[in-house]
């Protein structure tokens, strides 16, 4: 890491030596639970080294692979067509399926690189990408893809997060659930969004309830209950439900656990793909089984650490916790979360407008936050831009790109949440010398809202043509 002082003497560059010659830590995150990532999008592979995981935790590739499979490209026509299995290999830190307490190294080898897709970007930086800023900062850059700025780098975070989640679940019954709550101007209905935050869906529900079957020849989408929606705009159609049509259709994974909204999102994303354009949206995350007392005021408040983690992910542009910006419109008498008796000597809040923290320290209430993600920068439309030399240039970005990254984003947010959370837990345990407390069953979900909302018939039904 970069050292500014040696004793009372400042360490400064020698005459003519750029400050950049000194070593900086740029690819590591965490204090006691530390994750370092490596690799480029079109290189040999990507991976991470995880330091700080306790010994004797049961851990194999099977514990990590499911999350990587959820984020991998090529899942459906809603995502990039790049075909990667993203198969994880644990290289060190385990023996006979148990952690040794030593650094865990993990790696995924790239299989479907197509560097020639980026030949036309050698002279002109891609608008919205990091090509220009990397070139200015380092005097060089990865010649294909986004290099370290590519979403391929997040494989490492998802893998490390899966390890952290395994430990958090074992120690505190902590679970992290993230889903897509908006795409472009299509939002979950307000009452549905609030119900899901109060009683969040499981990952299985997120992956299944938000899945649609596409029947291009018939012009409609089908949800898991057999209900049909227009393939053009996602409007519910007046037709008898047919479960078999869901089972036989080509699957589209939206990870929005509300079929009527998911259908509108899928239709919009498909439209943008045809127009060679892209869009963004918002993901909502809820953490249940939250330990109490995490966060180090004043500058390492838990939500400050969490915001840094989320904003370090590619394409993230906004973060809010609890009521977020909406709290600016509320009265104090409404926004205050009143206390009531909990269990094990703890208090519980009657509401959770704060989103799980008070004064930057976790209260044990479910952690509720949202992250805004911008449109994918790589689009195939011609764009009037300029070369690195400033000459006018028309750039068309070839290759395989996501019209919307939201369906693949939940594992990324869950991974960084788990990494942040485990680091904070270890810091608190080091401070207090005792395991962290939770609200027990009072901090868990009922598990009823998603199934109930998914069964409700959609409104504004139109006749099937």
Image (cartoon, rainbow, N blue to C red):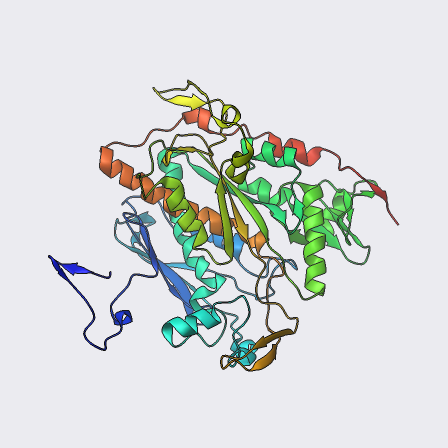
Residue for point 56% across, 37% down: 201
135 over 293 or under it: above or below:
below
The quadrant in which residue 225 appears is top right
The residue lying toward the viewer, choosing from 15 and 289, is 15
The residue lying toward the viewer, choosing from 66 and 192, is 192
x and y percentages locating residue 49 in the rendered image? 32, 58
| Observer able to see residue 62 | no
Residue for point 39% across, 52% down: 160
128 over 203 or under it: above or below:
below
Judge left or right: residue 461 versus residue 338.
Answer: right
Q: Residue furthest top?
A: 341
In what quadrant of the picture does the N terminus appear? bottom left
The residue lying toward the viewer, choosing from 169 and 367, is 367
x and y percentages locating residue 327 in the rendered image? 52, 34
x and y percentages locating residue 73 in the rendered image? 56, 61
Q: Give the mark count.
A: 0
Residue for point 40% across, 77% down: 140
Residue for point 38% across, 44% down: 304
x and y percentages locating residue 74 in the rendered image? 59, 61
15 over 434 or under it: above or below:
below
| Observer able to see residue 361 | yes
The quadrant in which residue 109 appears is bottom left
The residue lying toward the viewer, choosing from 9 and 166, is 9
Judge left or right: residue 265 versus residue 98.
Answer: right
């Amino acid at each position: 890491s970069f050292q500014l002082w040696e004793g009372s003497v400042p360490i400064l560059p020698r005459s003519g030596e750029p400050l950049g010659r000194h070593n900086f830590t740029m690819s590591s995150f965490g204090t006691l639970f530390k994750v370092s990532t490596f690799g480029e999008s079109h290189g040999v592979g990507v991976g991470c080294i995880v330091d700080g995981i306790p010994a004797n935790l049961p851990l194999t590739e099977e514990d990590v692979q499911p999350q990587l499979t959820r984020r991998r490209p090529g899942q459906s026509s809603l995502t990039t067509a790049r075909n990667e299995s993203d198969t994880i290999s644990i290289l060190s830190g385990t023996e006979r399926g148990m952690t040794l307490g030593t650094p865990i190294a993990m790696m995924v080898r790239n299989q479907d690189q197509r560097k020639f897709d980026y030949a036309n970007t050698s002279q002109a930086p891609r608008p919205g990408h990091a090509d220009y800023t990397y070139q200015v900062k380092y005097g060089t850059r990865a010649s294909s893809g986004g290099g370290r700025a590519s979403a391929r780098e997040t494989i490492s975070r998802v893998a490390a997060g899966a390890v952290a989640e395994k430990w958090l679940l074992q120690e505190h019954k902590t679970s992290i659930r993230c889903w897509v709550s908006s795409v472009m101007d299509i939002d979950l209905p307000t009452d549905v969004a609030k119900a899901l935050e109060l009683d969040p869906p499981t990952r299985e529900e997120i992956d299944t309830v938000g899945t649609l079957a596409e029947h291009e020849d018939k012009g409609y989408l089908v949800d898991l209950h057999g209900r049909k929606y227009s393939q053009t705009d996602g409007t519910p159609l007046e037709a008898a439900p047919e479960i078999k049509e869901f089972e036989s259709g080509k699957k589209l994974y939206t990870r929005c656990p509300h079929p009527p909204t998911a259908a509108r999102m899928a239709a919009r994303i498909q439209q943008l793909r045809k127009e060679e354009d892209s869009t963004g949206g918002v993901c909502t995350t809820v953490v249940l089984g939250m330990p109490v007392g995490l966060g180090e005021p004043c500058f390492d408040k838990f939500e400050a650490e969490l915001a840094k983690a989320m904003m370090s992910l590619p394409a993230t542009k906004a973060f809010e916790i609890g009521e977020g910006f909406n709290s600016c419109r509320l009265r104090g008498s409404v926004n205050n979360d009143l206390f009531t008796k909990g269990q094990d000597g703890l208090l519980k809040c009657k509401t959770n407008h704060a989103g799980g923290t008070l004064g930057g320290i976790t209260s044990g209430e479910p952690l509720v936050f949202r992250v805004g993600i911008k449109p994918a920068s790589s689009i195939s439309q011609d764009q009037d831009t300029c070369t690195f030399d400033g000459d006018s240039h028309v750039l068309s970005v070839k290759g395989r790109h996501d019209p919307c990254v939201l369906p693949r984003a939940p594992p990324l947010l869950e991974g960084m949440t788990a990494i942040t959370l485990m680091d904070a837990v270890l810091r608190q345990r080091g401070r207090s010398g005792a395991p962290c407390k939770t609200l027990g069953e009072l901090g868990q979900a009922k598990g009823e809202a998603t199934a109930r909302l998914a069964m409700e018939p959609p409104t504004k039904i139109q006749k099937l043509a």
